[in-house]
Amino acid sequence: MSLTPTVYPSLTIGHKIFSIIGCSGLLIGLISFTGSFPESNLTLILSLLLISTGVIGYSIIQYQRQSPGIQNNFVRVKTITSRGTTAWFLALTLMGFYILLYFFPQSLGLAESGNTGFIALFDPFSEWIKNKPASQWFVYGTLYTLAILLFGIKFILKYKGNKYQQIRTVSVMFFQLCFAFLIPEVLERLNQPSMDLKNMWPLNYYFFFDWNLDKLLQSGTLGLFMLGWSIALMLVISPVLTYFFGKRWYCSWVCGCGGLAETAGDPFRHLADPSLKAWKIERWMVHSVLVFVVLMTLLVLYTYFTGNSHILFLNSYALREGYGFFIGAIFSGVIGVGFYPLLGPRVWCRFGCPMAAILGLQQRYFSRFRITTNGGQCISCGNCSTYCEMGIDVRHYAQRGQNIVRASCVGCGICAAVCPRGVLKLENGSVDLFERAPFAPKSPKGDFN
Amino acid sequence: MHILIIGNGIAGITAARHIRQRADHQITVISAESDYFFSRTALMYVYMGHMHWNDIMPYEPWFWKKNRIHLINDLVNVLDDQRKTVHTAGGKQISYDKLILATGSLSNRLEIPGNELDGVASLYSLQDLQYIESKSTNLKRVVIAGGGLIGIELAEMFHSRHIPVTFLVRESSYSNMLLPAEESEMVNREIREHGIDLRLHTELTDIKGDEAGRIKSTLTSSGEEIDCQLACIAVGVHPNVSWLSDSPIEINKGILVDEFLQSNIADIYAIGDCAELRRPSPGRKAIEPLWYTGRLMGEAMASTICGTPVKYDGGIWFNSAKFFNTEYQVYGTISPKLPEGQKTIYWQQRDGKKSIRINYTEQAVIGFNLMGVRFRQEVCEKWIITKTNIEVVLANLELALFDQEFSPNYAHAVRDVYRSITGVTIRSVVNRKHAHVQAFMKNHQKSSV
């Protein structure tokens, strides 16, 4: 006899209609690869409109009649959310798209002499916004922003009755739309240095590259402001905010990677492995990337100031290219998003992001943030650990009545939302800063009994 | 010393874990239900596809080896207290120095015709859930009998699969032997809003089958015949102790134990659902088949076994549940009918979805009953233990609010209700900052030393 649900409700007609509408929008994009559409704004508008109608219509049908509360019914069984065939298909499609985008943009139609195909589809929109034909990065930015906005709306409908989730999602939608997309594109139109003002080193690993520093230094007041702002963000604003609120102020309120994970990635959050083994791998990997980016940046700066690219056996140019390829493109892009349906939406944030690693170290040792456990109310059900997208075994702490102070916690608050007994709450407190878990005396028998 | 624990539920496993934290005794846990400890309260989430079977196991398999807790999957059916040995169905003989009985409960049966038919189920064990899953295809209607927590969980489970449910409750309102009238009515509404056919004042009187011995329909006390393919009996549990009837262990309904959880036989103890306290503390029951009781008894047991005898103390009563989307928490004493000398403050949100009740006497606050609102256990407990005056509680009520950030501050509404009853205006003296809670609890620790 089996325990896995054998029967569960299938999609309603409404769900299917809106799925078809959304997919037809995607189909237009796919057909455009062949270059069989005339270059006109209408095609793009039609495509995006169909996609939007599909996602929003589907969400309304799904959540409108539900009373506030968590209903993760059958996410552990449906093929798309339980590593079934559709999940693999989606993962391979996403990875394929990223590989084309990063390494073979010509295959998408990018050309100096005039775009064709898929990229050309976005030309009218690009011309409208920044007076230039589309680049592959413009196409990517548009789709990325659209995904956060559409699935953000879905998320807000899903978590009705939960203000924390809704406000946080409006925040990531705002920062993606304005800071990551509109402001840089408009600045480019105005021939000003453009940058995403919320993207800081080391997530923005090329910030200290010579071309970026030169660009900022040679662009007058605005460039200098951007330089100063970025350094202030990194050295002052971020540590202060992290002290008061934990790394969540960035990872689940502002960051673009986090934004996509929280919205489009929400249906996959339970795929993050909460085992101790995964935690060990995570710590090695994420801190290795941190060491890598620090070393690479130091060498790049050394080269910038001395003009010398060789230090001992290391070549700063080779190092920065290696970082850009393996970490910037493969890890954060191809794997980071491609693995959503396989290992959850925070694969990059958890195993690779050096920014998350730095904020995490501060969160663990010098921040007011923690998840409070409500006395002895935990029933060890496991919803918190299952739905933690960072693979934190929240239950391990909750069932012992311990507060949770973990470097990797991005403060999304889903553990508190899915808890059926009201056991968890994200809080910022100051009194016990140096009495919390990292500083508390260890049990003589170790952590795991 | 070899400690043998029979039963791998929350009581037995808590005892095992805490014994290991304190000492190096040899520990064996034996269970016929499952290889590993799982959260019984989470079985419903497996049926609803929120979680996998693996997700509801609070410890990974390596945990038991690392902590040298030896697990055996077998059924104990004979106890030889003279030779300090048990015999298993699998033919093993296991001797012990100390024996902890943590055999849990069995579901109560209804002594009505047809209760043995194929398609009559209850929900307590893993095997029960497997049985229900195996019967879940082609269900046109399920009848649930019993207005307790298991009954409503079953209703939610079938509702998640869009299977029509008729829910028979003997009382005039759901769980009104546990909840005051308003809260009970709120749950009635919640049940009906989910499309459940709730029949109050109705009992199951007869189950009819076809020639093959399969359930066909049920008869109710109102004389109605309801066609169904599955009937779930959820009319409470009783201690699983019948296998001990030939042993010299003294049994009433459960295994009779003293304050140290010891039975009448030396070196044999009982904890959790199967234990019956000879002298329960005032206002408490001799048998409390609850997750929390099992855990607290397991902790006390470990201390006693390891040479620091501790009297079991249930502490200030608390419990929690979830009725579809409405969370329920209780701290302290809340009687369904307000006893003489007690007063109540009851606030209910206009939509009838949330409520806060605080019961008190002239001298002190005695209980909190929350529907759809989360309160902080340790704060409520401290107010009750220190016999805090109701007006002090109301002035500080923000300390108890445990809903996620950005939730409304319901404390104002509760104070308004108090003003409308008494004419006394109470002003808030704290806000919801966690630092206030920390300061409040610190004072507690100091004053209690």
Image (cartoon, coloured by chain):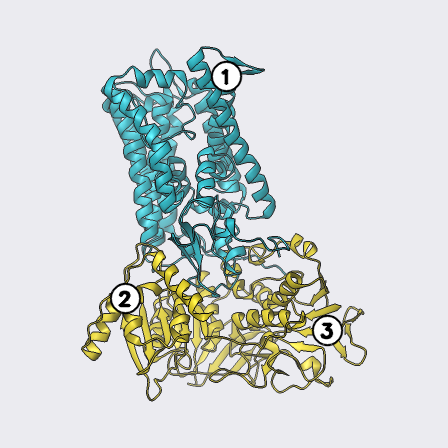
Q: Position of residue B145 (x, y in %)?
A: 48, 77
Crowding at mark 3 (Cα within 10 Å: few <14, some 14-19, many 20+): some
Numbered disc 3: what chain? B
Q: Mark 2 vs mark 3: which is more N-terminal? A: 3
Crowding at mark 1 (Cα within 10 Å: few <14, some 14-19, many 20+): many
Hue of chain A?
cyan
Q: Is residue B36 left or right of residue B422?
A: right
Q: Position of residue A348 (x, y in %)?
A: 48, 36
Q: Which residue type does callout 1 highlight?
A: Ser
Q: Viewer-proximal residue, A402 or A366?
A: A366
Rendered image quadrant of residue A201: top left
Numbered disc 1: what chain? A
Q: Which residue type does callout 3 highlight?
A: Lys
User: Is the Cβ of the residue at disc 2 closer than 8 Å to that at disc 1?
Assistant: no
- Residue A316 - label: 1
Residue B117, visible in the rendered structure? no
Residue that carries the numbered disc 2 in the rendered image = B411
Q: Secondary structure at mark 1?
A: helix
Report the Cα–Cα distance between label 3 and label 1.
Answer: 67 Å
Q: Is residue A195 left or right of residue B36?
A: left
- Residue A177 - label: none
Q: Secondary structure at mark 2?
A: helix
Instruction: Classify the position of the N terminus of chain B by image quarter.
Output: bottom right
Residue that carries the numbered disc 3 in the rendered image = B98
Residue B279, above or below A186: below
> Image point 48% across, 74% down: which residue?
B144
